[in-house]
Amino acid sequence: MTTNCENASSSMPGPTADPQLNQSTALESRSASNDKAVVVGIYGVPGSGKTFLLDQLKQELGQEDFEFYEGSKMIANIVPGGLDAFQKLDEQEKLHWRQLAINTIGKECADSGRVAVVAGHFIFWPEEEEAGQPVYTRADLDTFTHILYLDVPAEIVAQRLLDDTERSRPPSSINHLRKWQQAEQTQLRRLCRHHGILFSLVFPHPTLHNKVSTLLRDFRHHTEEYNLSRAESKMDEVLVAGQGQLETVLVMDADRTLVAKDTGTLFWKMVSNSRQSRDEECQLKTLFSSPLGYSYTAFRQAALLYEETAEDQEFNALCEDVASTMTMHPEFVSLLQLAAEQEHVGAVVVTCGLRRVWDKVLEREGLSKTVKVIGGGRVADGFVVTAAVKAAMVARLKDIHHMYVWAFGDSVLDLPMLSKADQAIVVVGEEQTRSKTMDAALLNAIDNDGLRARQALLPSNAPPRLDTTKLPLIQLTDPEFIDSIIRRRSRHPLQVLHATDRNAAKLLMTPMRDATIAGPALREAHRRVGWYLATEFLTEMIGLEEYPIPHVQGHQTSGYRLRHEKKTSIVALMRGGEAMAFGVNEAFPRAMFVHAKRPEDIEPNHLLRQHTVVLVDSVVNSGKTVVNFVQHVRSLHATIRIVVVAGVVQAQSVSEGSPAHALARRTNFSLVALRLSDNKFTGRGTTDTGNRLFNTTHLP
């Protein structure tokens, strides 16, 4: 790519950069720098409409979050003497200015936090020349994070060039334009795969700028961390309906686990058959065998491939066709049907493949109401599923939701998930269709990483993996195996999140411990602690939900709030907990606020149709008060989520064997604290927190 103008091409005898740049180094560098600017290239042959699209995007997106650049204008701005002077330079000097141009764009947007959208050129190719001249630089490959290519039919481009009276452009034949476009697309795909740049074709359409705007908004905020948070939020949504009853969750891979086939392979085969081309059939294979491997970037690229392959209506039809050819293993159908009959057992499919296909497969099997799918495949899904995401889903189920997790998978991508689970089952299919790389990776996981797993053969006459000593055999239909899944566990250890060693906690706790601070100033310090704990920990524990808000530029955008915020009750344990509870309420303004001096002050109507109750106190010493309140809440509502929020918690009050810890095994609740303390001191008079908060230290 270059930010050079079109009419400078005549002076360039050849490429300005070596196409075989150090690809692995560039990819490693890009992977390591998550804080770099998002810089999106808009490419296409002359006449494809880059400038027109850029103008539309400016109107649609504004310039609060985006900055738009024309290559020729950028060159004119930075080269003394402008474009005329640039054209007279030798190739090495031109290379210097091109690299400076893209580096300047990258730095400006890194400093401003805006997304750069750059209209540029990749190849200049006069028709009389046998080959085109690539004009990208090493700096381009280091700076661009995304490239969108305008794939306009050559006939339309040719006519535009003829009709363009404002610019002096040499005419090009339709055949030459097609050859030019194909060369650019082929080379760009290869370079982007080898340098960690996401690439997608976009097609002319009356709403093209809307499509590109949607992609740019997604590119702006979609990082690996954001991707994981969206996936975790989806898991929380799946669990929230049965949160009070669930004890055990079955987490299942999809392709070659629930069915013998790979739905992604079949999808692309159907696409290639419909278009009478084998190019599409090998797209994913080429992608995942590139230096991107099975990384987050690779799965994001796969989603863009699905985007450019079909619009929503055609995509849904293809997914329907793929699903109609899939038959789930009857052993899994029976297991999932049995799980659905147990209120304490849930099941979720976590797939790196196409969510829409698996939604339809489960619907055909009558399981869609009880088995949910966490997966991607399209930009609108909001996230992609990688091996790391699968592992994080299992970890979240165990660590945050306190579930006993069974994981089922068949491939190397499932090993991190299997390793995190309480029980791991490797599904082994027929030898000719199963993963060829799994045996070595599985053996390493067992011998070196501590994986303990068993294997299920589907069909039952399939040869086992490894040996049955390292990987014992089980049958999914065996009554003892089924009983081990569906038996009740009732294990709910007390979950405690705290900020004791964080710098934020040290700052926030200072005025709380300062003997010279009391009254309104101390209440303000407690309020700030409540707000901090709410935003830092309660949002992590309970999760967020997305909702539409009006953007300042006039369009709709996404906002976030606490999941089921309006169905949350914040209870201030009087009087010490009131100030901190106000801080929690400030973070979650739609929540109900309740004052309670005694447990009985919490009435049934305070919990009616609520999802969560947050009990707020300033200090937890013995834990007796907390236990009494939790027991009372549970007596009124058997399944409501209970979270205790406190400023200081005496560590022994929540340790193994404490009344609070014992209660958590019978009645699930969690605790959030600014600080855990080993100090068993109980304040009185001038040292009592309640007295200090309200200047009543003189009272006995």
Image: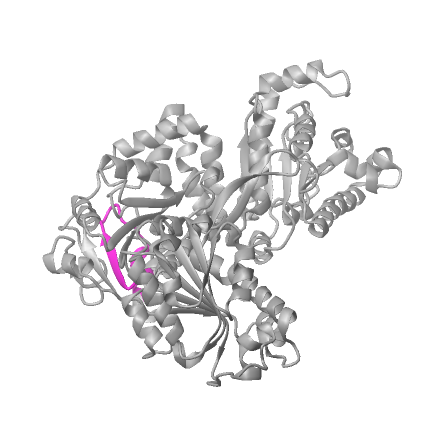
Q: Position of residue 426 (x, y in %)?
A: 25, 57
Q: Position of residue 26 (x, y in %)?
A: 60, 53
> As drawn, is 96 to the left or to the right of 361?
right
> As drawn, is 91 to the left or to the right of 359?
right
Q: Position of residue 74 (x, y in %)?
A: 78, 38
> As drawn, is 639 to the left or to the right of 90?
left
From the viewer's perspective, is residue 657 above or below residue 383? below
Q: Position of residue 79 (x, y in %)?
A: 84, 41
What is the number of callouts on the image?
0
434 within the magenta span: yes
> As drawn, is 628 to the left or to the right of 106?
left
The color scheme shown is: one colour
From the viewer's perspective, is residue 77 above or below residue 473? above
Q: Nearer the viewer, residue 433 or 262?
A: 262
Classify residue 52 by image quadrant. top right
> Which residue shows up at 52% across the image and 65% down it?
578
> Which residue shows up at 76% across the image and 30% down it?
10
526 within the magenta span: no
Quadrant placement of the N terminus: top right
Residue furthest toward the right?
Answer: 81
Q: Nearer the viewer, residue 226 or 69?
A: 226
Mark yes or no: residue 400 visible: no
Residue furthest toward the left?
Answer: 479
Residue furthest toward the front?
Answer: 699
Mark yes or no: residue 538 visible: yes
Residues rendered magenta in the picture: 420-445
> Which residue shows up at 41% across the image and 26% down it?
313
From the viewer's perspective, is residue 60 above or below residue 176? below
